[in-house]
Amino acid sequence: MRKKHSQSFLEGAAVLTLSTIVVKVIGALFKIPLANILGGVGMSYFVSAYDLFTPIYSVTVTGLGVASSRLISETAASSGPGGVSRVLRASRRLFLALGVLGMAAVVFFARPFSAAISNPGAVWAVYAIAPAVLFSCVSAIYRGYFQGMSNMIPTAKSQVLESLVRLAAGTSLSYGVTLLLRRSYLERGEVLGRAFASLDEASIYIFQFSAAAAIWGVTLSTAAGAAYIRWSFGKNVRPVQASPGGEKGRLSVGMRLLRIAVPISLSTLVVNLTSMIDLMSVMNCLKAAVAENGELIRSMYPGLIPGAVTDDMLPEYLYGSYSGLAFSLFNLAPAITAALGVSALPAVTRAWTSGDEEQMEYTVNAVIRMALLVALPAGLGLFALSGPILRFLYPARLMEAAIITPVLRVMGISTILVAATTPVNSVLQATGHERMTLATMAAGAAMKLATNFALVSRPEMNIQGVPYGSLVCYGFIVVFSIIYLRARTGVRLHLFQGVCKPLFCAVLCAGAAYSGYFTIFSAMGGAFRLFLSIGCGGGVYLLTLLLTGAILKSDLEMLPKNEKVAKALEKLGLIR
């Protein structure tokens, strides 16, 4: 067994970060038109299934893959190709079994789950996502191998392929089903045998099947990703005889893999913690709030709730507005920083195992600093321009955008905390402290859940109370995790270089973007005005990063032709 390519930590991070950015852009091209097609109610059906799948995907592709990559990285250093082959065979058996069981569980619990979250219309979408669990486990087998051998390219390519298939299949299937069923109503006055008094009422029913069609696109995308990564493995890896050990030896490897995989897989849910808890609690809390004083809630959003949305449908409308419009923006920076964590894990594992304290300190500080370099401007930018961004992205859903603008403003701060949490947790996992990350996540989850029930259930807060739970949850997790990392590993954290400088630059960036939109470019058209303002903020951010020395010479390894760039900036005295 051999690896065709191997990258350093920063080169691997560059590959995964670039692919994540591409995936997120394609994902926006998927979710933005989908939100415009489905609206608040339809997106509540879609998101109920998608938010169920997202943590499952995180546990399988990310969590199981990370566990496998850690064990493969350790085994490659100690036992060579034969040992790696044993780990790979054990992961095949284990992950395929988990995939089959997971798929069956989703099918079996689809109706009880939809009822438990007070969104029974989501059941068809939940059924549609079930096969994706198996395909995700197949992907985890081979992504874990490539990542453990420090080759991030196959993972990156499979991610991009998945997102392209999701865009093409999900959008076309959802739009096609919507048109077909609307035509049925216009021609016969009924949809699938049910009569409705108006097109608005029929559309709410149609959205159940439109959302399920979009979810089928997601399932097809995971099948395409699994097929590609398996093909890439067969093409690039020469089979090697596994080292001897017999059935007992294979069982031992499988149990070791499971012991590593369970806490790591569960702790990878930290990125999806908000969506999981919101999925299980927000709809029920909103129903309680509407039952207590629905008129007060409606009075908070004058002219922003369609007449066809009754009090029974109001929780779906508010939740769909939040999860369908705002959450994908909230999750952008954490997705990118999660890629940094995945790339750093093999490097941290090797440094920790070999006792290389200097390399350990460099890698840990690099991953935290680079995560904040991404997260701080993204989060503060959302805080400054939440309204203009939502209006630009969802022109067909301006009512939902207006409702959710204050929520996204607070979520901008939360996204910084989430983005910082994921790479820190990856470092803790790489150094054998995965159980502590799991315990910390559980404590944060309890805080988030308690805050949701305390705030969202109040009619005067309703959906506006959701982001404050995320602030409390992730604020605790990131602070405690950093303190624990410092205490248990002895790594010295460079807080002034890694936190203070990027924060100063990001505040100036957000201030420039806000001033540009509301003052300097206020006389210009909407979209052009927004782009100029973002460009102004980005320019200020890059300039201040260079002037304050927040970017180090080693960071430029992530750029193509980095030697020329580094020499030019060194001559100007902008990097060291």
Image (cartoon, rainbow, N blue to C red):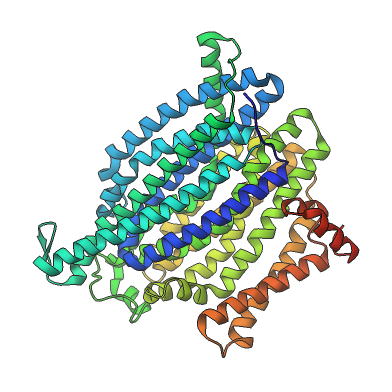
> Does residue 364 appear to the left or right of 59 in the view shown?
right
> Does residue 367 appear to the left or right of 359 in the view shown?
left
Placement of the N terminus among the 4 image quadrants: top right
**What residue lies at 63% left-to-right and 59% top-to-bottom?**
375
Q: Nearer the viewer, residue 48 or 277?
A: 48
Could you tell me if residue 71 is visible in this image?
Answer: yes
**What residue lies at 52% left-to-right and 57% top-to-bottom?**
24
Residue furthest bottom as drawn = 523
Residue furthest front as drawn = 235
Placement of the C terminus among the 4 image quadrants: bottom right
**What residue lies at 27% left-to-right and 37% top-to-bottom?**
108
> Does residue 58 appear to the left or right of 502 in the view shown?
left
Measuring from the top left, give residue 302's x and y in whole percent. 34, 81
Q: Nearer the viewer, residue 39 or 159?
A: 159
Q: Nearer the viewer, residue 497 or 147?
A: 147
Could you tell me if residue 288 is visible in this image?
Answer: no
Measuring from the top left, give residue 161's x and y in whole percent. 48, 48
Measuring from the top left, give residue 332's x and y in whole percent. 55, 58
> Does residue 3 appear to the left or right of 460 in the view shown?
right
**What residue lies at 58% left-to-right and 15% top-to-bottom?**
241
Q: In the rendered picture of this protein, how many numbered marks are placed on residues?
A: 0
